[in-house]
Image (tube, rainbow, N blue to C red):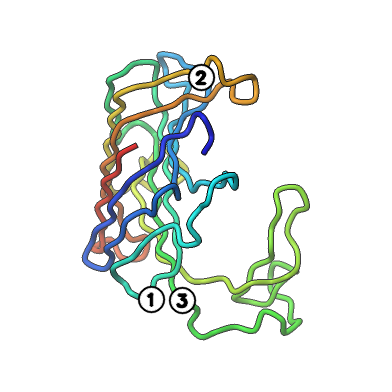
Amino acid sequence: MWPWASSVQASIEGPNVSATLCPNSFVAGASGALSADGGVWFDIAQNTDTVIGIPVVPIAYRSPTDAIGGSLTVFIPIADEYPATYGNGSCGWVDFQLGLPETPPVDCDSGVVGSDGICPAGCSPTCHRTAGCGLPCLPQNPFIEYSASDQCSSKAGQGSYTLAITSLETLVDAGSMYSGYLTVHGTLSAKVVNANDPTDTVEIQATF
């Protein structure tokens, strides 16, 4: 795991979903120049450090039993003080996506090109950090998106979140490769709302 990152433990609970993050699957941290006006962005994202053994399935679901994968992404601006608490009005957002199986299965080798100019409808290209996106085409699983955000962010205002920062640490000995990154510890509580059904909500409780 990157020297600045903190492993995230989290429960995800709602009427239609019950899950936990698998160990080492998601990490928390912050980057930017610390300032009193919130020059740093705190984030939680899926761990892509291939040096360690990352679980094939990042989220363990108890329900729905046919859930496939998924993601948790958090971006919240913070300032140079701790302990500190940030909530709605901070211009941040929390996004959870619940992956579902293909219905019905699609043929990604049919050769029929969809609207993206690369793959058939229901499929997505394989993307690489340096080479861009192209073949082979892989099934694009449907998903349900739950989010909490402020109206000042790029997403519509809905749901709620509370980020409690207990410590911030600058990695002064980590070398220039990691300059600008900070190790963050604390908790996150969020109530995220189904993008297609505002009556369907999920509670997220995370520590890092």
Asked if marks 3 and 1 touch (Cβ < 8 Å), the reply is yes
Q: Residues within 10 Å of mark 3 (few under 14, many from 20)?
A: some
Residue at the image point whose x is 40% and y is 65% from the top = 144
Amino acid type of disc 2? Leu
Residue at the image position 33 percent from the left and 74 percent from the top: 65
Residue kind at label 1, given as amino acid type: Asp
Q: Tell me if 120 is positioned left or right of 4 in this view.
A: right
Query: Is residue 157 positioned above or below 31 on the image?
Result: below
Disc 1 target residue: 66
* Residue 166 horizontal/vertical position (percent): 29, 24
Q: Pointer 3: what residue?
A: 101
Camera-side residue of 154 and 10: 10
Instruction: Name the residue rendered at 33%, 65% in the picture.
Output: 61
Residue at horizontal 75%, vertical 68%?
135
Q: Which mark sits nearer the N-terminus, 3 or 1? A: 1
Assess disc 2: are there few (<14), some (14-19) or many (≥20) residues with their C-alpha within 10 Å of its C-alpha. Answer: some
**For the residue marked with disc 3, what is the amino acid?**
Pro
Secondary element under disc 1, as helix, strand or loop, is loop
Q: For the residue labelled by badge 3, is the local secondary structure a helix, a strand or a loop? A: loop
Q: Residue 111 falls in which quadrant of the image?
A: bottom right
| Left or right: residue 152 compared with residue 121 | left
Return the x and y of residue 107 as percentages of the image width and height: 64, 84
Q: Which residue is mark 2?
A: 171
Mark 2 or mark 1, which has the lower sequence index? Answer: 1
